[in-house]
Amino acid sequence: MQILQNTVPKPKDITTKHIGILLFEGFSNLCLANAVEPLRAANTLARRPLYDWTYYSRSSQTVQSSSALPVQPKPLTGEAAGAALLIMPSYGYHQLDTPDLRRSLRAAAGRFQMLAGLDTGSWLLAAAGLLNGYRATAHWDTLGELAEAFPEVDVVDARWVIDGARASCGGATTTLEMMLELIERHHGATLALEVAALFMFGERDPQMNPLRRWPDDQLLHAAAALMRRHIEEPLSIAAVAEHLQISQRRLEQIARAETGDSPGKIYRRIRLAEARRRMEQTRESVAEIALRCGYRDPTAMARAFGAEYGITPRQARQLAK
C-alpha cells in the first residue's frame, strides 16, 4: 500500500534536479542503492542529466554502512540546496536525534523543496517538528513508536507516502518504489516505467492467485518487466495480457490511462532502448543488434530507431565515443 497526496501534473522538466542524501553511520547499503540507481538509470535512459546528487553527512568524515561500505560525504552546510534531501539513518536513530541535528534539518527544510525520511529517517524529521500535520510512514519496526511519540504526525501503515513537501518510506525495497513515483512526477510515467523495467521491478508471479486484484500501476510495471525479459523474442500484447491474467483490452486501457501510450509503444521503446545500449556499449553489428532486439529486418529497426531518437543507430554509436 502507498499513499499519495497533493498529486501534481507530470511536466517534462528539462532542468537538472539536485538530490541531497544525508547519510549517518550504519546506513543501509540497499536503501542507498535503491535511492540513487533509479536516478542514474533515468539519466541513462534520457541521455541527459535529469538528476545529480551529493552525499552529505554531519561532518566531512567517512561514513560506513551497516555492512561496512565507506562513503566520503560533504558536510551539510547552509549552501546545500536542491529538489529533495533524503534523510537516511538506520539503527541508532534515537542517539542521532540531537538538538543540533534538529536545527540543521529545520534549516534544510528552507533550502530543499522536499524532505524525505527513508527507513527510520521519519523519526528524525518528526523529532525536528517537520512532519507535523503531514502523513508519514517509517520502517515497520518503528511505526507504532513513531505514532505514540509524535501525535501531531498522521502516521500511516504504508510502504511509502508522498504528502506535499514531505515524503517517507519504510525501508530499502520501498525506497525504489518511492523514487519511481518521484521520477514519474518529474518526468512522466513512461520514463518511470522504463526505469522500473530496467531493474525488472514489478514482475508478477504467474502462479499467483488470479483472484487477487492488483492496482493498475502494479499491473503495468509487471507488464513492462515481462516485456524486458522478452526482447529478443517479443511476446504479442495478447500474450503479455494473458500472463498477467487480464484481457488485452484491459491492458490497453491501463497503459493509456497511466502513460498515454499503448502497450505496443511501451514495448517498442523498451526494445529500442536496449538496441541503443548495445550500439553504444558493444561492437555488435546493426544486423546482430536488430536480431537481439526482436527485429528480423535491420532496416525496420533502423527506421524505428530513427523515429524514436532522431538519429541512426550508427550515429548513436559515433556520439557515444
Image (tube, rainbow, N blue to C red):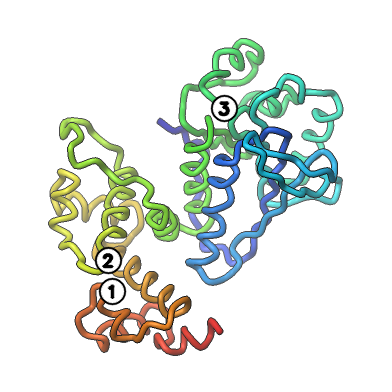
Q: Nearer the viewer, mark 2 or mark 3?
A: 2
Residue underneath mark 1: 292
Q: Where does residue 315 sit, x and y in percent of width and height? A: 46, 89
Asked whether, in this view, residue 263 is left or right of residue 142, the answer is left
State whether residue 255 is above or below residue 140: below
Q: Nearer the viewer, residue 212 or 36?
A: 36
The span from disc 1 to disc 3 (Cα, nearest Å) is 45 Å
Q: Nearer the viewer, residue 137 or 23?
A: 23
Q: Nearer the viewer, residue 152 or 243?
A: 243
Residue underneath mark 2: 231
Q: Quadrant of residue 149?
A: top right
Identify the residue at the far front of this view: 68
What residue is rendered at 72% in x and 49% in y? 55
Secondary structure category for the residue under label 1:
helix
Q: Quadrant of residue 246?
A: top left
State whether residue 99 is above or below residue 68: above
Asked if the residue at tag 3 contacts the one at tag 2, i.e. Cβ–Cβ closer than 8 Å, the answer is no
The span from disc 1 to disc 2 (Cα, nearest Å) is 7 Å
Q: Nearer the viewer, residue 8 or 307?
A: 307
The span from disc 2 to disc 3 (Cα, nearest Å) is 39 Å
Q: Where does residue 182 sit, x and y in percent of width and height? A: 53, 48
* Badge 3 amino acid: Ala
Asked whether, in this view, residue 159 is left or right of residue 146, the answer is left
What residue is rendered at 38% in x and 77% in y? 308
Asked whether, in this view, residue 184 is left or right of residue 100, the answer is left
